[in-house]
Image: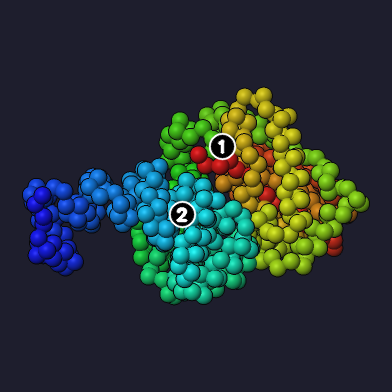
Amino acid sequence: MKQLSSQKKQELMMMHQQGDVEAAAEMSKKLIKEYPKEFLLHNILGVCQEAKGDLKGAVNSYQQAININPDIPELQFNLGAMLYALSDNKRAIHHYQKAIELNPTFTEAFFNLGITYQSQSKYDLAIKSYEQAVNSEPGFYEAIGNIGTIKQLQGKLEEAITLFKKSLTIFEDGRGNYNLAGAYRNLGNLSLSIKHYRRAVEIGSGEAEFYSDLGDALWHDGNIEEANLFLRKAVEVNSSNPKSNYQLGIFLYDNKAFTEAIQYFESSKIGDWEERILYCFYKLEKYDQFKQKLDSLVTQKNSSPFLATLSAHYAQNFKIKDSYNFCPSPLNYICHEQVPELMENDQRLIRELINDINTADIGQRKQSRLTSGIQSSGNLFKRQEATFNKLNNALKKSINRYFLRYQNEDNEFIRSFPKEINFSSAWFVKMQSGGYLSSHIHEDGWISGAVYLAIPKDSGPGDQEGAIELSSDGDEYPRLHDEFEKKVILPNVGDVIFFPSSVFHRTIPFNSNEERICIAFDVKPKLS
């Protein structure tokens, strides 16, 4: 059989190494016609096709090389990488595993196998693969960091932080600091979060998400001016980044710059961007534009609590029929009941929860709607304290009972009710005398509510001070009249009140010198 000369091989390799991809590809194709059994030619052609973005062509070339010689681990790896890039995960896994079989210390193959499993949410298999990569190469900081990312996704924030720190001791990079900052943010430690976001920005290479997440954290820490600078910087460095545009839009929206916010929501086109624009139109009293966009959205989205709020308020405001049948008469779906687990053993769990709220290292965030009070940062139900886990489980039981009570109702709120109760957020709110929370909804929730740990005994002359008011109107929406429904509930210690997230709610100010303490929460369905 005719053999490819060493001179030809060297010439081709030199051409490839010098970056002349087109010439190397053309030469490979010509030589393949003359030497079809030279796997090296097929491999180089595959590398050239990969460099040009022709992934399907690269797959074909690598497969041809493997058909000639299946025992070279690098060829199996190359084919696996291209198949993963084409979202053919099953075949990618097969070829990564084949590469490892041929070379049991193939670090990169273990790492890529972990990435593929992680993309499928097969976290145990991903962690095992990353650990094998680290065993093969103890300084493989990217694999250690990826294990940390999985732990964070699983809610194991303390483990995630330990792994992110370990990764950074091996090699400090922007991404590692960004990941650590995110874990601290979820844990509720805004100061450490901001510290590492700043470091990520300092040593990163201009990633838009580093700027935008730093800006967002600064905003929630009350540093509005600097937050504005970093959020705008994120869009400046990458104007096409959806997340950066969306976060800047949210910041402007919350600070009542509605006209400017619209353009950034338009640029983002992610999440609830259309509902946010609709909100801006309504707040600006641009009713014609609002109605035009509303008519379009109600035919496209059947399960948006935020859209339900806007549509219902508009209908009641103009005294017309609501065109969006998400949850008719949402005040009928308010639940007010006692949490049995909080009342057991002379309210022992309540005392333990208050102690953890007062003594644990839980960060605080600034809340523009909150007066004479503090609000925690992060998700309490992702923390390690046993008390929060116990409350989490107790509330899940309460919400499951709630669903069983309404399961035969014919509306989208019940039909698309979360199949698994997972709290997307949970935070405490402590108020002192004169405290209140102004009217709002939770735009990204499905069910929202609060469980009450301390309520002032003096509820004022009308027995409503410190109560929660639920209504079909609020958040300074434009009103043409005052004929909106509302319901006022004065909770007792150990009670929970929850409701569709589309319902406006506020705390009625109180004058007692006793504290009012509750843990608020949101539940929302998992994205399909």
* Local SS, label 1: helix
Q: Amino acid at mark 1?
A: Ala
Query: Pointer 1: residues within 10 angstroms few (<14), some, or many (20+)?
Result: many
Q: Amino acid at mark 2?
A: Gly
* Local SS, label 2: helix
Q: Position of residue 301 (x, y in %)?
A: 48, 34
Q: Is residue 83 shown above or below 358?
A: above
Decide if residue 189 is on the left or right side of residue 286: right
Q: Which residue shows up at 72% across the image and 62% down it?
A: 373
Q: Earlier in the sequence, mark 2 or mark 1?
A: 2
Whether residue 365 is visible to the viewer of this picture, yes or no, is no
Q: Is residue 34 shown above or below 239?
A: above
Q: Position of residue 273 (x, y in %)?
A: 46, 47
Q: Which residue shows up at 9% across the image and 60% down it?
A: 5
Return the residue at label 2: 114
Residue 201 location, quadrant: bottom left
Q: Position of residue 7 (x, y in %)?
A: 9, 65
217 vs 292, nearest the viewer: 217
Decide if residue 27 is on the left or right side of residue 298: left
Whether residue 360 is visible to the viewer of this picture, yes or no, is yes
Q: Is residue 195 shown above or below 68?
A: below
Return the residue at label 1: 308
Q: Which residue shows up at 66% across the image and 65% down it?
A: 364
Q: Which residue shows up at 66% across the image and 31% down it?
A: 329
76 vs 438, nearest the viewer: 76
